[in-house]
Amino acid sequence: MLGFLLRLLPFWVREPLLIAVGSVFGVRIMYLAVRDQDRVAAGIGVAFLVFTVIRLYAVVRALRARRNPVPAASADRATVDAAAQAHAPAPAPAPAPAPASAQVQAHAHAQVGTGTRPGPGTPEKEPNAWGQAVAAVAVFGALAAAVWWGPRVLPADDSTPQPASCSVGEDEELPKAYKQTPKPVTGEELCKALNRPDLAKLLGTPGETATTASGTSNTAPLTDGKVAQPEAEVAFGTYTVNVSATYNKLSTGQYVKLMKFGNETDVKTLSVLGRPAVFSSDHTMKFEIDLGSGGSGGPVEEGPLARTLSVALDRDDRGGYYEITVWSTSGALPNDSALLDIAEKVLPTIS
């Protein structure tokens, strides 16, 4: 159907359109082929460009033919006229002159009959080939620009998974502990600092997209709401990352001593951003909540192992610490270097 419609178009409209189509699509496909290193796409692009060159050659030949018409037609016409004159019969004797009134009427009829009719040698007005070509190229150029820039201007496809944005309570009122703490960070600020575009890459899973991201401005348990403890959490398909800040008087050195009496394992002290820090491992808690009628849920069980990096709030270690914890449902953990990279990227933006 498309080929039939193209054949109906005049030559000076059809050919510029085909040239525009071939050049635009050929260049675009070749660009994508070079970028993606796709040989099949490169072959298609070459085919479009060769097609364009062929059509351009046909237009050039047509233009040359219009500028330099072959004089054979005029020579043939002259030969025919000469032969007609040679074989024409002798002229008949001139008739007697007609009356003046008859001559005037015959002359008037001749003017009426032949005055408005063009002679056989009058050339017909041909369409402006250059105007048609320019108009065709302009129209298709606009269509090509729309195809080229459309994906960049139009919104992305809804089927493409989008990274999760931080969800926090609207107009959440901070507890009194935050007002009594100098320059505390909130859960919203922690979430924005943690939910980085390169977080999955830092974890060693660059192809993943965050599924959930949240932040809360809570207080530490067993402190009667007197210690601010904001936290944020970002979950991926493989790992879940939690960052919290505890504004108490406990130094990192004291915290390490408490770990010896707890269940933490694989304890390792170090320095991060010039501050005292410590690595530790512990199991998360796993529990079920039954939302059915009369059910209270299952017992609390031991969950997968989690790896935590605790870093002092300041270089002097005057109390308080940040904690970066990573775990997965499968029990697999990233290298400690991943937690160090997260700490070096996230902590400077919140402290």
Image: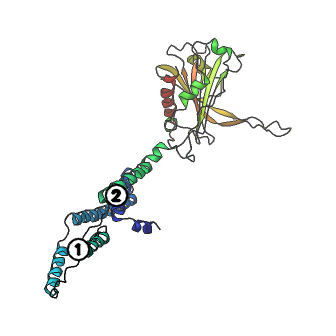
Density class for disc 1 (Cα within 10 Å; few <14, some 14-19, many ≥20) is few
Work out whether residue 162 or residue 123 is closer to the camera in this orientation and state it: 123
Quarter holding residue 169: top right
Q: Are marks 2 and 1 in contact (CB under 8 Å)?
A: no
The residue that mark 2 highlights is: 132
The residue that mark 1 highlights is: 100
Name the residue type under label 1.
Ala
Q: Disc 2 versus disc 1: distance between alpha carbons?
A: 55 Å
Classify residue 181 as left or right of residue 336: right
Work out whether residue 341 or residue 147 is closer to the camera in this orientation and state it: 147
Quarter holding residue 221: top right
Density class for disc 2 (Cα within 10 Å; few <14, some 14-19, many ≥20) is some
Residue 338 coordinates in the image, percent (x, y):
50, 34
Residue at (30% x, 72% y) in the render: 109
Name the residue type under label 2.
Gln
Name which of mark 2 and mark 1 comes first in the sequence.
1
